[in-house]
Image (cartoon, rainbow, N blue to C red):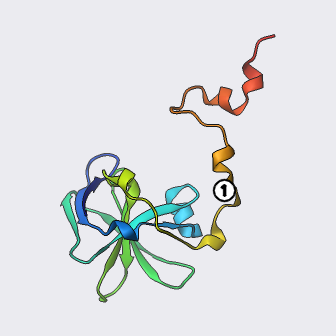
Amino acid sequence: MMVEGGCHCGLITYEAYIDPETVCICHCTDCQRLTGTAFRTFVLTMEGGFKLLSGQLKSYIRVGESGARRVQTFCPECGSPIYSTSDGDDPKVYSVRTGNIRQRDELVPRAQIWCRSAQPWLGALRDIPGQERQGDLAAVLNPHAHRRS
């Protein structure tokens, strides 16, 4: 499946040929820190399957808990994560971040990794009240505070 993506500010654009059966959720603590949330979703593409169309990525190398050296790439302007891959000369597999893929609603996760680091409240998400848009967040979080007697 061919997908198009880009960063939040629009500087970085790309296309990638991905297999939708490789969409995965990662619960590792690095992914939690890098996303600022509970997990990251990604999809795999092989070397040659990712094509940068505009902008230049910034990158750094992170050594994960597993000992693997991972090149993390992101937009130098807005910081949007784009992909990670292994460091070194071996053939590359790119973990493309699904959040910035235009077709992300078609990319259903098929597996989860590093589940031992998963936040324990994730299973309770269906029980947490929600709204279609932000609205008055204070009223949602504390509905009794805004009632008038």
Pick out the residue farthest to the left: 53
- In the picture as drawn, the residue positioned furthest to the right comes out as 149
Indicate the secondary structure of the residue bearing disc 1. helix
**Residue 22 in the image: x percent, y percent?**
39, 71
Front residue of this view, candidates 67 and 123: 123
Name which quarter of the figure residue 138 lies in: top right
Question: Which residue is found at the position 38% from the left and 58% from the top?
Answer: 107
Observer able to see residue 149: yes
Q: Position of residue 104 (x, y in %)?
A: 36, 53
Task: Name the residue located 22 percent from the left edge and 57 percent from the top edge.
Answer: 55
Amino acid type shown at disc 1: Gly
| Location of residue 121 by image quarter | bottom right
Is residue 24 positioned above or below 3 on the image?
below
Q: Position of residue 10 (x, y in %)?
A: 27, 47
Residue 62 left/right relative to 9? right
Residue 129, placed above or below residue 9: above
Front residue of 58 and 114: 114
Q: Is 48 in front, or is 20?
A: 20
Q: Residues within 10 Å of mark 1 (few under 14, many from 20)?
A: few
Work out whether residue 126 or residue 88 is closer to the camera in this orientation and state it: 126
Residue 79 shows in the view: no
- Residue that protrudes farthest toward the bottom in the picture: 90
Q: Residue at x 77, y 24 (%)?
A: 144
Side of 6 where 107 appears, left or right: right
Determine whether, in the image, residue 7 is placed left or right of residue 128. Answer: left
Residue at the (52%, 78%) spot, across then down: 64
Quarter placement of the N terminus: bottom left
Quadrant (top left/top right/bottom left/bottom right) for the C terminus: top right
Q: How many marks?
A: 1
Q: Which residue is mark 1?
A: 123
